[in-house]
Structure formats: structure tokens, C-alpha cells
Image (spheres, rainbow, N blue to C red):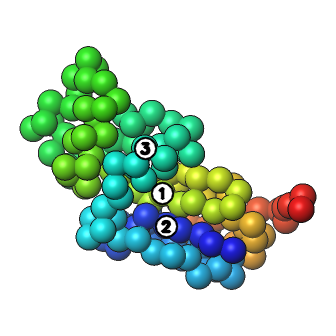
Amino acid sequence: MTITIYHNPACGTSRNTLAMIRQSGEEPRVIEYLKTPPTRDELVALIAAMGITPRQLLRQRGTPYDELGLADMSLDDDAIVAAMLAHPILIDRPIVVTPLGARLCRPSEVVTEILPNAEAGPFTKEDGEIVPARKARIIAE
């Protein structure tokens, strides 16, 4: 099984999500998207797989969001995607892709919705918050 996380090691939510994946017994493919940004086609496919709009994936805090005028609601999806490609820090994180789907994992426990083995037990986040285990999933083959 292949699980991929688009990860920023400087982000606590991203680190917690990666740890939850590993606790479930999976070793994901880790893409540090600031070092290896997705291509336009990859980014558009991720957005579609998550069922969100480019604007919903746009990160504001700690980015050039304001300087680039990205609050302008007249900007279309192509303009937002172009901004994210030019400035990958604008891509919110972490994004996780599993055989069960793709999600922007904010908060980190969203990852349990798409982990095949999310029942691996409760997880304690870096800040001490405990995330209870999810019930086992039955996957139709």
C-alpha cells in the first residue's frame, strides 16, 4: 500500500500527521513539498482528489498571501494555482493521499478518515492532546 504525505517538517500539524501514519503501521512516501514542489498537473490533481477548491488549499499565515493580493475574490482558480506554484509555501499542509482518498489534514486527526489501519490505538499530539483511535474499517476488495 502506498501512502504519500506532502510534508513540512517545520509544521507541528504536519509532524503529528506523519506520526499518526507511522503509528498506524505504514511508512509513507514523504514529499517535502517546499524542497520538491508538485507540478501544475500534480497540484491540480491533488486539489481535485480532495474535492476542494484551490482557494481552500491556500495558506495565509506565514506566506506572501497579503503581498500578492490573494484575498482578491475575483482571482480565478488558475491564478491561485499559479501563485501556489510560484510560492509553494502558499500550499496548505499536510496533504495525505492513501488508497482510501486524499485529504488536507488540518487538524491532523483528519488523517484517520483515510488511514486503512487508523485503529492502531490512541495518539498523543506534540501538545499533549490525545486523539482516540478510530474503529477498524472493513475494506471491500
- Residue type marked 2: Ile
- Image check: 41 left or right of 136? left
- Residue type marked 3: Val
Which residue does the numbered mark 3 point to in the structure image? Answer: 44
- Image check: 22 left or right of 10? right
State how far apart marks 1 and 2 are (Cα): 6 Å
Which residue does the numbered mark 1 point to in the structure image? Answer: 95
Residue 84, compared with residue 55, is above or below; it is below
Q: Quadrant of residue 56?
A: top left
- Foreground residue among 51 and 94: 51
Which one is in front in this view, the residue at disc 3 or the one at disc 2? 3
Going by the picture, which residue comes out furthest to the front?
41
The residue drawn where x is 25% and y is 49% is: 85
First in residue order: circle 3 vs circle 1: 3
Measured as percent of width and height from the top left, residue 134 is found at 77, 62
Quadrant where the image shows the N terminus: bottom right
Q: Quadrant of residue 37?
A: bottom left
The residue drawn where x is 25% and y is 32% is: 79
